[in-house]
Amino acid sequence: MAAGVLTDLKIYDDQFYAGVFEGVAQVTDGFNAASSNALRMVTQQILGQYQKQSFWKLPAAPTRRDLTSVAAADIIPMTQGEIIAVNLRRKYGPLAEAVGALKITGSDMREFSFVLGEQYGQQKAKDMLNTGILAVEAAIEGQSALVYDATGQSTTTLTHGHLVSGMAKMGDQSGRIRAWVMHSKPYHNLVGQAVSDKITNVADVTIYSGNVATFGRPTIVIDAPALINTVSGSTTTYNILGLTEGAVDVIESLEQTIASEVVTGGEQILFQVQYEYDFAVKCKGFAWDTSNGGANPTDAALGTTTNWDKAATADKDLSGVRILAQ
């Protein structure tokens, strides 16, 4: 019987990356144009643990000039604020399969490579989207002036009135809200109300592109963990986010690494693969707290509201609003 050689057991680049591309395309619909650029996925090399960006803080408003006086005016010092993004380090695997098992099932390394690439691409993109939502939800939640709690109202589920009340938190800048991000439960509550209210073209896919039921804004419906608040013994509540343009950037900060090897010494020869990738998360108008949140934070730390410090002076310059409903 002919023995296999090492070249029979490698990741095939064309097959693998085709799978990665297909997997990514299937789960990244919430980014970029689909969300009116409220959720953005970009590629930018970021070395170190953080990306820091300074900006000028201007005086709040002009003041009256006294035409009857030539006295010295008070000098207003210029100050700067700082937006800080945090880098996250991720791995997928290691994954291993017995080479003999692949042969017995009639598979080969090209097919195995494609399947691995597709699964990795899906999991990576899903992780980046869910993590971006986790971060921006925590950042907005920490700003009480931008939160509307519908659970104390006569109707506690999501309604069009609650959407309006949430947008009102942005005052005269409510038009900055570009997209809604919500769990499927409040979304279907909203669709049900729209049907009962006889709002047309709602109970079909057109709602995703934005219409009267969502006030012309696209809606990203995703059952992300950060959109669910489950407290033992209490009713489950949901976070609905109204996001401004550039509310959260998910930045692929370093080139991904894909490594494979043949592992011997066991009962069977194994083919093992492991992946590493890095991305940063930046929330509009906020600075990651490098002292309390630290480098390469856990999801628990990333979702802690106090780890996102308000950097912009005005609430209207932040990521958006949060609505709490059942």
Image (cartoon, rainbow, N blue to C red):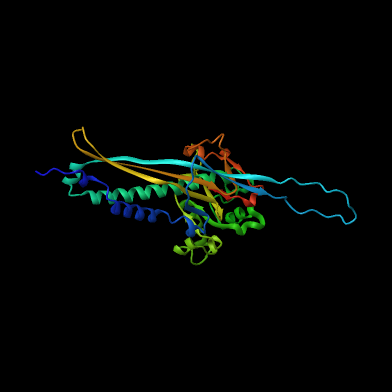
Q: x%, y% of residue 322?
A: 57, 49
Q: Is residue 221 left or right of residue 107?
A: right
**Frontmost residue, 16 versus 203:** 16
**Frontmost residue, 76 versus 20:** 76
**Frontmost residue, 6 versus 109:** 6
**Going 21% across and 46% down the picture, which residue do you hit?**
7
Instruction: Decide if residue 263 is in sight here.
Output: yes
Rendered view: 93 above or below 42: above
Instruction: Decide if residue 326 is in sight here.
Output: no
Residue 175 image-quadrant placement:
bottom right
Report the number of discs.
Answer: 0
**Frontmost residue, 100 versus 179:** 100
Q: x%, y% of residue 259?
A: 32, 42
Q: x%, y% of residue 306?
A: 58, 38
In the displayed orientation, state which residue is furthest to the right: 68
Q: Is residue 128 left or right of residue 154?
A: left
Q: Is residue 171 left or right of residue 253?
A: right
**Going 23% across and 48% down the picture, which residue do you hit?**
109
Q: Is residue 189 left or right of residue 61?
A: left
Q: x%, y% of residue 235?
A: 50, 42
Q: Quadrant of the N terminus?
A: top left
In the displayed orientation, state which residue is furthest to the left: 1
